[in-house]
């Protein structure tokens, strides 16, 4: 049985259209909601271990990481990552659109993508904070077995983008929020 290129293109188009048919889960109301009693999943990849390399190595990330959150979703630990992305026009040409982004859910152990969709980045996510994500994560004090970063998000502090970082003490489950410019 032979396949015609036009038929294969039609099948691919239908698959691409239907890949957006499933709903992408919304994040919990606040960081830490729905955790099963602890903020420390087994076999976790710590943000300070993957922030620098993930942007160039994973299809879950379009470009610079602008936010992450640890979530417990459908009996599974995941990282929700937000990143800048490149928008292309109908001709495959790059369109300068700073609000274009990607949000992905990835497994906390393997960092493999589970689901991805396009998002509109906030003004804070489009801004450039004084510190890169990895530098901010390192300055947060995250270290084994101490506080674990459970959320990094860009906020506007004064008139500049900054990182708001939430850590969780892995022994007491106490959350601490800090802002790093």
Image: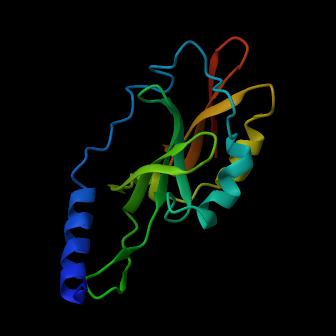
Numbered circles on residues, count = 0
Q: Quadrant of residue 89?
A: bottom left
Counting from the top left corner in percent of width and height, residue 78 is at 52, 37
Q: Which sits in the foreground, 58 or 18?
A: 18
Residue 91 lies, with reference to residue 174, above or below; the image says below
Q: Is residue 8 visible?
A: yes
Residue 6 lies, with reference to residue 137, above or below; the image says below
Residue 178 lies, with reference to residue 139, above or below; the image says above
Residue at 27%, 57% in the rendered image: 19
Counting from the top left corner in percent of width and height, residue 164 is at 57, 38
Residue at 34%, 85% in the rendered image: 92
Residue at 62%, 67% in the rendered image: 56
Q: Which sits in the foreground, 3 or 168?
A: 3
Q: Which sits in the foreground, 6 or 20?
A: 6
Q: Does residue 36 appear to the left or right of 73 in the view shown?
A: right
Residue found at the very far front of the displayed protein = 1
Residue 26 lies, with reference to residue 159, above or below; the image says above
Counting from the top left corner in percent of width and height, residue 168 is at 65, 23
Q: Does residue 50 appear to the left or right of 26 in the view shown?
A: right
Indicate the colouring scheme.
Answer: rainbow
Q: Quadrant of residue 180?
A: top right
Q: Does residue 117 appear to the left or right of 141 in the view shown?
A: left
Q: Quadrant of residue 137?
A: top right
Q: Is residue 153 visible?
A: no
Residue at 21%, 72% in the rendered image: 11
Q: Quadrant of the N terminus?
A: bottom left
């Amino acid at each position: 049985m032979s396949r015609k290129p036009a038929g294969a293109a039609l099948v691919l188009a239908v698959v691409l259209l239907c890949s957006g048919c499933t709903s992408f889960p919304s994040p919990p109301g606040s960081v830490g909601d729905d955790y099963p009693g602890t903020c420390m999943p087994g076999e976790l990849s710590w943000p300070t271990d993957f922030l620098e390399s993930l942007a160039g190595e994973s299809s879950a990330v379009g470009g610079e990481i602008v936010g992450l959150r640890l979530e417990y979703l459908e009996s599974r630990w995941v990282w929700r990552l937000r990143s800048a992305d490149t928008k292309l026009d109908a001709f495959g040409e790059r369109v300068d659109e700073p609000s274009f982004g990607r949000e992905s859910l990835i497994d906390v152990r393997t960092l493999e993508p589970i689901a991805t969709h396009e998002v509109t980045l906030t003004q804070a996510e489009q801004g450039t904070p004084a510190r890169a994500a990895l530098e901010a994560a390192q300055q947060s004090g995250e270290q084994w077995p101490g506080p674990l970063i459970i959320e990094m998000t860009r906020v506007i502090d004064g008139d500049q983008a900054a990182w708001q970082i939430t850590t969780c003490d892995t022994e007491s489950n106490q959350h601490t929020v800090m802002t790093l410019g």
